[in-house]
Amino acid sequence: MVSPLGNVAERRNYGKSCRQLLHRVDQCHWKPPRTRPHPVELLIDASSDRLPELLPIKWTRMAASPFGFFRGAVPLMAADLASLPTTGITVQICGDAHVRNLGAFASPTGALVFDINDFDETMPGPWEWDVKRLATSLVLSGREAGHSDGVCKEAVESVVAEYRKSVKHCSELTVLELARYTVHRHMEAGPLPGLLAKAERATPQHTLEKLTQSRDGARRFKEEKPLLTAVSDKTRREVLSALESYRDTLSHERRHFLERYQPVDVAFKVVGTGSVGTRDYVILCLGNGSEDPLFLQMKEEPPSAYAQYLKAQIPRNQGERVVQGQRLMQAQSDIFLGWTRMDGRDYLVRQLADHKAAIETEDLKGRGLTEYAKMCGEVLGKGHARSGDACVLDGYCGDAEKLDSAIAEFAVAYANQSTADYQLFTSAVKRGRLAIAKGVD
């Protein structure tokens, strides 16, 4: 992903030459291709390997709003993005860059940081795909918060402007400075202080009270069907066995601390929107007594929705793909981040909800949308600069506002497309083509 060109000037000039492949002003275009598949059928096909009994929960969450639909429709946008021209500049993409997939979490030192925190779809790909998905999410979430399209476009222009500034700043750092670089600007503006305060409260002890109960003198997971359910003894043994090979993916010192914890219970948990229907297990471990919990999440990782459209070398294990992408884009990652395999399926392993917090619709009202957009733009720029060539990216993006306006135009057009697809989706629900779950949000 790093350009083979030698010096900084050559790399910037190469980036600038990519404008001839795709002018910055032409990043605005969106027109559905003539061969575009029906959105509902594409989403059903993309879910064919999911647990069918859980899909009604996924459809229910997607039916909640156009933004809810967008969150669960990565395969659809991946197909649409693949129909568009690109600059040919490759970075590690998050793949599902939207406003709720950036948030606060605890760094290895325990300090709270703000960064991208969902990498299920990550792989090497065109940088503009992440930017366009993030930009569209700002429009859809902004509309949900009651903003006009004019305000939403201003927020998108802010996110792209900050992205450009971030890439430029990173292009001027030494390699080691870039490797260590963590975003701190904008942390005291808009909704960020409230988000960090919420993350501060999301402790393992809080999760212990929320997800478990004392039973026969020991802590065990609560049953909250269908979102949190007990597993069979056979499944419990298989999950704990899979943790053995997971340990081998950790560095020696991290394995040392993990081994201080003993697993005491396993449950099946439904998570997210796009991930609903995949296999997801949570493991309660205890260290120095019953008040020292560690929650691990063993999350199934199918291939990225982008894999069929991109030629890229990725690890055979999809969990390892996610770990590699996350470590490339984040300066500070979960100390217990690793991968494993169970029953022929690949899994990511990480801590569950360790001081994690995501933005809510209420947080994006007023100036919150634009202030939050600035932070998102800087963070995404940092992630792309770390994993790609910041000089090439900076050469293409430049200092002018042409790219900002173009992406804003695209974001509104694609938000309109996504809303139209949402209407087709809800019509399918009403006709009974898609079953939804009652009493589940």
Image (tube, rainbow, N blue to C red):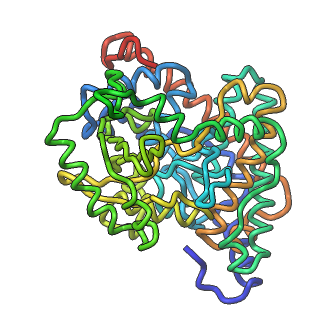
Answer yes or no: is residue 2 visible.
yes
Q: Tell me which corner region of the image, top left, top right, bottom left or bottom right, holds residue 435.
A: top left
Q: Is residue 209 above or below residue 396?
A: above
Which quadrant of the rendered structure holds the N terminus?
bottom right
For the point 26% across and 37% down, which residue is it?
A: 48
Q: Tell me which corner region of the image, top left, top right, bottom left or bottom right, holds residue 415.
A: top right
For the point 59% across and 77% down, which residue is it?
A: 2
For the point 77% across and 59% down, which residue is it?
A: 164
- What percent of the width, then of the height, locates residue 318? 34, 58
For the point 25% across and 33% down, which residue is it?
A: 51
Answer yes or no: is residue 302 visible.
no
Horizontally, residue 96 falls left or right of residue 143, namely left
- What percent of the width, then of the height, locates residue 356? 58, 42
- What percent of the width, then of the height, locates residue 220? 33, 33
Q: Nearer the viewer, residue 232 or 436?
A: 232
User: Which residue appears farthest toward the left when viewing the image?
Assistant: 234
Q: Tell me which corner region of the image, top left, top right, bottom left or bottom right, holds residue 171.
A: bottom right
